[in-house]
Amino acid sequence: MLPTTASILSRLRLKQLRLLIALGEQGSLIKAAEQVSISQPGATKALQEIENTLGTPLFVRTNRGLEPNDLGHCAIRYARLIQTDISHLRDEMMGILQGHGGRLSVGVIMGAVPFMTDALSRLLELRPELSVEIVEDTSARLLHLLDQGRLDLAICRTSISRQPALYDSRNLHDETLAVVAHREHPLAKRPSLQLADLADSRWVVYSANMPMRLLLEREFHEAGLRFPLYLLETTSAFTTLSLLQKNPTFVALLSIDVARFCTHFGMTTILPLTLLSRSEPYQLITRHGASLSSIARLFIDQLMPAPSQP
């Protein structure tokens, strides 16, 4: 049985985490000891202490050296995350001490990227030395990262969560959806289209139970059409655009902001199809009761500017 979190925190030391990372890189106790500037006996003892602290072996001893087992790979990955977080801690503290800079971690779903980048551009005009991490993913994944404290805030939706009360959320921006395709799509020149015209098309869609996917399924159902059987599922904007570029008969559902951006640069065209369903608005989401940094609050001001006075 694994020890408690409190037990691990009270016994694990940062130098031990450095040794874990070095072992993952070197595969040799001797080379890892050299990398972290300790003796081989000291490294052997430290590794024993790490495994005792975590309550399980992390490496397999072979003729080639030390090879991490599945738990070892897990421990090494989190050791690297902790090292990165400490580096970010130093960077943010340095920015605060120098009166500028700082660091911001933002999660965003694909459709909200243009909206987010507009606000971020305004923020960077105010704080040009700010370091920013942007994570684009599904709402489910972003909420998970928010739970772990790896994001300051996210622009996504809480409707996919089983525990929406864990978050503070505010509606940011209504989303309109558009069907897009290659500029040479066979139906691109039509003055108007019905969903039935695209019923036999190969669709590039989000995974099941994601809001955009559910909306598309609802559109097919209300039109009395069978939902397409042969789908290409992805959460990647780049993958979606690449598929549309390579396959002029494919179609995809995107937010109107992303669709207009791609069409403006000649990557896609917006097909003349009007969807009946309304999409959920994007939300600004933070952990309930979380203390936000001054940079996070300033970014929120750019996302949600105060209404102008009459």
Image (spheres, rainbow, N blue to C red):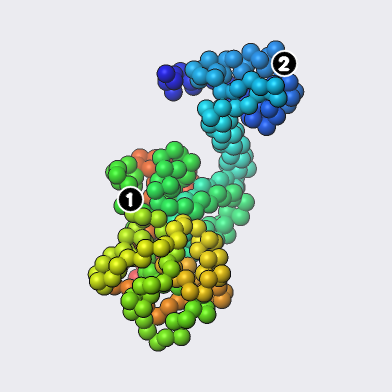
Q: Nearer the viewer, residue 105 or 193?
A: 193
Q: Amino acid at mark 2?
A: Gln
Identify which residue is drawn at 30% across, 43% down.
Answer: 163
Q: Quadrant of residue 73?
A: top right
Q: Quadrant of residue 18?
A: top right
Mark 2–mark 1 distance (CA, rounded to whole Å): 50 Å
Q: Residue 120: x, y in percent?
A: 52, 58
279 horizontally vs 256: left or right: left
Element type where label 2 sits in the image: helix
Identify which residue is drawn at 58% across, 39% down.
Answer: 88
Q: Which residue is mark 1?
A: 160
Q: Quadrant of the N terminus?
A: top left
Q: Nearer the viewer, residue 167 or 196?
A: 196
Q: Residue 209: x, y in percent?
A: 34, 54
Q: Residue 229: x, y in percent?
A: 37, 63
- Vertically, is 284 above or below 273? above
- Vertically, is 78 above or below 6? below
Q: Tell me if mark 1 has few (under 14), some (14-19) or many (20+) residues whose alpha carbon lies within 10 angstroms of its own.
A: some
Identify which residue is drawn at 30% across, 67% down.
Answer: 226
Q: Which residue is mark 2?
A: 40
3 horizontally vs 65: left or right: left
Q: Residue 89: x, y in percent?
A: 57, 37
Element type where label 1 sits in the image: loop
Residue 38 seen in render: yes
Q: Amino acid at mark 1?
A: Ile
